[in-house]
Structures are given as C-alpha cells and as structure tokens.
Image (spheres, helix red, strand yellow):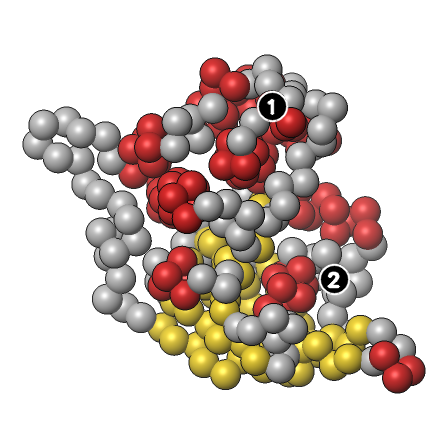
Amino acid sequence: MAETAIRLRNVQLTLGSGRSTVHVLKGIDLHVERGESVGIVGPSGSGKSTLLMVLAGLERADDGLVEIAGTPLSGMSEDQLAAFRGRNVGIVFQSFHLIPNMTALENVAVPLELAGASDAFERATRELGNVGLKDRAGHYPGELSGGEQQRVAMARALAPEPAILIADEPTGNLDQETGRQVADLLFAEQARRQMTLVLVTHDPALAGRCGRTIAVRSGIIHDDGLRDDRNDEARGLRTPSPDGAPDGANAAAQAVR
C-alpha cells in the first residue's frame, strides 16, 4: 500500500466575522500519496490558495482532520507548526519572498540555519547548483531576474529535503517562456527526489503536467481526476539519449541559465 503524504477529512474553514464572514472551505476531503503530483485549479476566490495554506499549516482549519506526513496538525502550537514545516514541507510562493538584504546563497541557507544544520552553506551551494544558479550565489535578489529569483526560492524550499513541496502560482509572475523553464525544473526536481508536489495555478497547461488535477469551486472539490496515463514525456522529463544528452533536473537547470 502506498504511503499517505496528505490526508484531509471534512475540513472546514471560515474567515472574517459578522457580515464579512466567508465559509471558505466546506467539508474538504483529500488523499494524496507520497510521490504524487497534484495540480489544484479553480477561479479566483474558489478557496484553492486557502486550501494550500491549510496543507502548509499556515492557516488553521476550524474543523476536520488535517494530517501531513502522517502527523495531525491540530493541537500543535505555532512554534511546533513552524518546526514541523521546516522538517517536512517546502513552500514556493508566486512573489518569491526572498530577503532583499541577503544574497542568493544566504537566502537558501536560512531554513537550514534555523534547523541547526552545521553544513548549511555547503548544502545551500549545492541546491543553487541544482537550479543552475551556483554562479549567482553572491547576488542579491534585486540583482536577479524574476526567473532567477523564483529558482532561488525553489532552492530554498528544497534545501531541507522536504517530503512535500507546496507551490502557490509558481509561474504566475513570470513570462511564458521563463515560466515554462521554471516548471520544467520544478517537475524534474520533484521526480528526481520522489517527493510529493501540490501546486495551485490558474494555468490549465501547468496543472495538466501533474499526475492528477483537482478542481475547486466555492470551497468544494468538484472534480478529483486521477489519471494513470501520465508519463515522463508528458510531464516534460526525458530519459538520457544515446548521445549522452542531459536529462531531468540537469537539462532543466541548463535550459534556464
């Protein structure tokens, strides 16, 4: 039996108060296996980004079960949730959220230093290399393009080697070609590390690269399509060619340089 990465049961969430009260999530049930890639789509205001924040432990459900990597999140303090995220969940945001007065290397090293890793900068250097930015390690966010900033954010999310990667509109602030290249890298790293990927997007083509697409409307999952016919080629990955051409994450990293 496949290992469960994410399990939600009857998750309810209401935001605001009085006349401003909005029932955002209405009895969400969701099961995601380890190593699965899931795209969440839906119109603005459908609750898809809020659902992602619940999965990341950044928003608390009012009711229901939220179990991540085999651990229920209910009852955890904010400090316990932060420590749990640091060990198990990587997050990539649309707006990058890099620290402007830190270099790319320092940004990637932050979660490792917070976790007490003695080799934080060595691991951060390796992660920057994985996303094709080793030569930009000493640059500040303001000196990097949007695509480079998103790759730094991706390296930061991947550095602690999380079991689950959550991405909220990871290509939303990028032009079409740069977005495609970043998506190539995202899926290549997910496959190479065999981690669980859950992403929210308005782009049906990006969601379609996931093994499964979930449609959310008005706080309810209306369609949970499990597709078994996805393969590496459909997701933008390639096996090595006879002439030794690079594959997977290496090819994606080279493409975005």
Q: Residue at x 23, y 30 (%)?
A: 246
Give whichever of discs 1 and 2 has the lower sequence position: 2
Relative to 230, residue 87 above or below? above
**Residue farthest left in this picture:** 242
SS assignment at label 1: helix
Task: Count residues near mark 2 (Cα–Cα under 10 Å), then give few for <14, some for 14-19, many for 20+.
Answer: few
Relative to 130, residue 96 above or below? below
Q: Residue at x 52, y 19 (%)?
A: 136
The amino acid beneath tag 1 is Glu
Q: Residue at x 63, y 79 (%)?
A: 219
Q: Residue at x 29, y 33 (%)?
A: 251
Question: Quick check: 195 left or right of 252?
Answer: right
Total number of numbered discs in the rendering:
2
Question: Quick check: 136 left or right of 66?
Answer: left
Q: Position of residue 84 (x, y in %)?
A: 68, 48
The amino acid beneath tag 2 is Glu
User: Residue 143 — which label?
Assistant: 1
SS assignment at label 2: loop
Residue nearer the viewer, 132 or 2? 132
Q: Position of residue 124 (x, y in %)?
A: 56, 24
Task: Count residues near mark 1 (Cα–Cα under 10 Å), then give few for <14, some for 14-19, many for 20+.
Answer: some
Residue nearer the viewer, 120 or 189? 189
Mark 1 → mark 2, Cα distance in angstroms: 32 Å
Q: Position of residue 16 (x, y in %)?
A: 85, 74
Does any portion of residue 163 appear in the rendered image? no
User: Residue 60 — which label?
Assistant: none
Find disc 2 in the rendering and name its residue: 59
Relative to 111, residue 88 above or below? below
Observer-side mark, 1 or 2, equals 1
